[in-house]
Amino acid sequence: MGYLAENAVYPKMYRVKQRLKDEKLKDIPAEVKKQLDGIGLREVLKPGMEIGVCSGSRGVNNIAVIVKAAVDYVKECGATPFIIPAMGSHGGATAEGQKHVLEKFGVSEEAMGCEIRSSMETVQFENAENGAPVYYDKTAYESDGVIIINRVKPHTDFTAANESGVVKMLSVGLGKQKGASAMHDNGLGKSIPAAAKVILKNAKVLAGLGIVENGRDETYLIKAVKPENFIEEDAKLLEISYGQVPKLPCRDIDILIVKEMGKQYSGTGMDTKVIGRMKIFGEAEPSYPSIKKIVTLRLSKDSYGNALGIGLADITVKKLADSIDYDAMYSNLVTTTFLERGKVPVRFETEKESVDVAFRTIGAVLPENARVMVIDNTLHIETVLVSQAIYDEIKDSVELIESGVELKFNENFELV
């Protein structure tokens, strides 16, 4: 069934490239070593110590290289490294699931040359100053110390001085499912730094490695952080990250077509601060961009059925909805407490029908005049497709790659 008028045509499209910041590190292992030496970690590590190197579940560029460099550094100092998955409730909230997530990112025992100790067991410390219960990975607690590795970036659920970074990995990542639930239940913005203070007082945290990526998701800088400076240094790195992250090239969009969503692109499947939607009670919605309809077409196979964030879309496709593993999605969704994000929107049999419904429901705008943008996913937005109306507005600030592009669908009515 078609939802556009028979004589309606899609807008003329342009493929454009944004001018993103692209400075990056050239020798990552050397930088890791330099940074850890710079905070005096070599003097702290002793032969016989067992040191946990903590890695998360996000699609961080070069994460395997960075983790391996930290593992090798610990070995150079005569200590014994092992890897701890630090990802809250991700990986289906199971020890094996979390180990498998790391392996998908290249952080395997074989590649790293050390053991991965994955467990969902935690110890509980005193409550944080805001009353939030504080949990901490038992394996990490029983080690001789841990090194926290995480990318520092804007969080998809809130805005605060500490968002996603080494502080969050302490409170949420190493809190496992119990800790992640406690942080969400008591308000992430306040609970994350408050819980981190408790953990830093009670656990043997030796160092952090904060990673900031450039506009092309490449490693821009790596900063080693002493435990006593975690909160303030994490906040400084977040400010740098905000200056690097890309955004969509215009504010007002009638239809945004997201070809693929998934956990490797964002913890919410689609980055809330890219699409301008959070859907969290009590949190202000981002002011940029303003989008009338979001159409999400596909779920990445690497998400293993976890479609958390599908509720941020207005329209989707039956094939995507049918591929959802509700057990996997709900274990993540309920932990966050943000149930709106798991609600499956209206869905149609084909991608073409879904796109046509979007054109049909944006108000008194002719399809050929609509402000339309097509992106592969919310992580990779350097190159995008934009309609004539948007191109006329942004043409002086982007590089034109191709004009006269048509919105086409194949024999299965899939966008090509």
Image (tube, grey):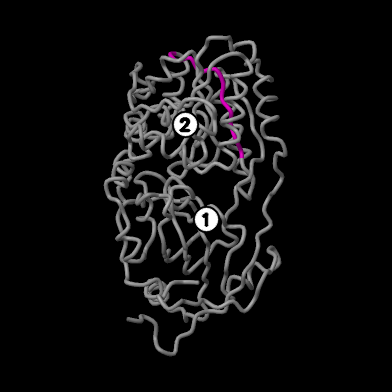
Q: Quadrant of residue 381?
A: bottom right
Task: Please give left or right for residue 134 compared with residue 238 in the image.
Answer: left
Query: Which residue position is annotated with label 2?
Result: 168
The foreground one among 129 and 202 is 202
What residue is shown with label 1?
A: 288
User: Considering only order in the chain, which callout, 1 or 2, is on the residue closer to the N terminus?
Assistant: 2
Q: Is residue 30 above or below residue 354?
A: above
Structural distance between the alpha carbons of marks 2 and 1: 25 Å
Does the magenta portion include 204? yes
Residue 197: x %, y % from top left: 46, 20
Q: Look at the image and give the residue range highlighted in magenta.
A: 202-212
Q: Main secondary structure of the magenta part?
A: strand
Residue 192 place in picture, x, y as percent = 43, 29
Residue 315, label in figure: none
Q: Is residue 70 left or right of residue 365?
A: right
- Disc 2 is placed on an element classified as helix
- In the figure, 271 relative to 113: above or below? below
Closer to the camera in the image, 183 or 251: 183
Question: Residue 398: x percent and y percent?
Answer: 68, 64
Q: Residue at x 35, y 66 (%)?
A: 317
Indicate the position of residue 184 as horizontal and vertical percent values. 35, 35
Residue type marked 2 = Lys
Relative side of 73 to 88, left or right: right
- List the single residue furthest toward the front: 110
Give the label, 2 or 1, closer to the camera: 2
Q: Give me the residue at 52% from left, 39% from top.
A: 106
